[in-house]
Image (tube, grey):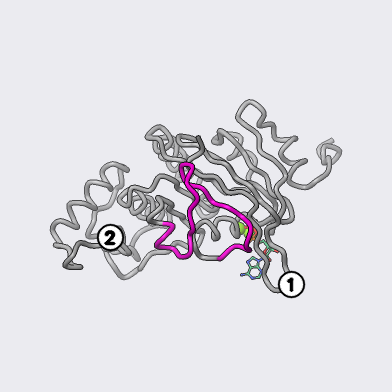
Amino acid sequence: QPILEMVGISKTFPGVKALRGVELRVYPGEIHALMGENGAGKSTLMKVLAGAYRADPGGEIRIAGDIVHIGDPLAAKRHGIAIIYQELALAPNLTVAENIYLGCELGRTGLIDRKAMAEGARAVLDRLGAGFGPTSIVADLSIAERQLVEIARALHAESKILVMDEPTTALSSRETDALFVLIRRLRAEGLAIVYISHRMAEVYELADRVTVLRDGGYVGSLDRGAIEPDAIVRMMVGRDLSSFYK
Ligand code: ADP
Ligand code: MG
Ligand code: MG
């Protein structure tokens, strides 16, 4: 059973139909690449999932089989969805621990002990093998380290679905390799990872399944055995480009 199922998702902005009946089915323990050329609708689909955008009526989102309404970002979080955007959503002047706990539903007092917070953050940072601690200030961290803070926040929230929107854009090749090791570990732990990219080499290396969008429409999905770069490029652009390579 898919952990996440999106069916018939449409989104209209004034003058632009950004999504037209898109579908996406993601299984636990898989890296699912979401591909498409710039403007295909990848980020919009994920913003619908994140509760940042309200989809047009008629579509359906299911989590572990149950229909859910994701009206705002907190609802997304409650349903186990964590999204890491290209523009990272961290408070730069706060510590790593404060960022990991940011937006948490706190206990009845609404307060959390600083020591408990540092310990909780330390535990999740250790799990990720982070080279910085809970009291570091986020502004002092590299982009790769900030990404790790966002992943730590997702793990701390016990997210089941982790979406990463073009996460390697600003990373060095060493940082990219480290991220891939981590993503594979999270997959082994049973997380479902939606990996947005338009980089074929990355997707070929990493993905268990690929869904392709084009001009806001759903083109199709391929599983591991059928992932073949030429076929995906054809799906992304809507025509055969093999003559360009000759
Ligand atoms: P991708 O992430 O695949 O590059 P996007 O989801 O960002 O594509 O964009 C899909 C389409 O929707 C594009 O035509 C884009 O210009 C349009 N779009 C995205 N966000 C908005 C918005 N907030 N308002 C109006 N149009 C938007
Ligand atoms: Mg884009
Ligand atoms: Mg995008």
Which labelled disc corresponds to residue 15? 1
Q: Quadrant of the C terminus?
A: top right
In space, the residues marked 2 and 1 are separated at their CA atoms by 39 Å
| Residue 194: percent from left, percent from top | 52, 45
| Residue 199: percent from left, percent from top | 63, 45
Relative height, residue 66 to residue 216 (above, below): above
Q: Nearer the viewer, residue 207 or 201?
A: 207
Ligand 1 picture quarter: bottom right
For label 1, the SS is loop
* Location of mark 2 (residue): 101
Q: Is residue 154 left or right of residue 116?
A: right
Image quadrant in which you'd find residue 75: bottom left
| Residue 230: percent from left, percent from top | 75, 35
Please give the name of the residue rendered at 40% of the width and 44% of the height, measured from the top-left corner: 160
Q: Which of 202 and 174 is in front in this view?
A: 202
Magenta extent: 54-76
The crowd level at tag 2 (other Cα within 10 Å; few <14, some 14-19, many 20+) is: some
The crowd level at tag 1 (other Cα within 10 Å; few <14, some 14-19, many 20+) is: few
Tell me the kind of residue under disc 1.
Gly
Relative height, residue 91 to residue 143 (above, below): below
| Residue 122: percent from left, percent from top | 22, 50
Image quadrant in which you'd find residue 142: bottom left
Please give the name of the residue rendered at 45% of the width and 61% of the height, measured from the top-left corner: 88
Tell me the kind of residue under disc 2.
Tyr
Task: State yes or no: residue 63 in magenta.
Answer: yes
Which labelled disc corresponds to residue 50? none
Q: Which of marks 2 and 1 is nearer the N terminus?
A: 1
Classify mark 1 as within 8 Å of ligand 1 or not, answering yes or no.
Answer: yes
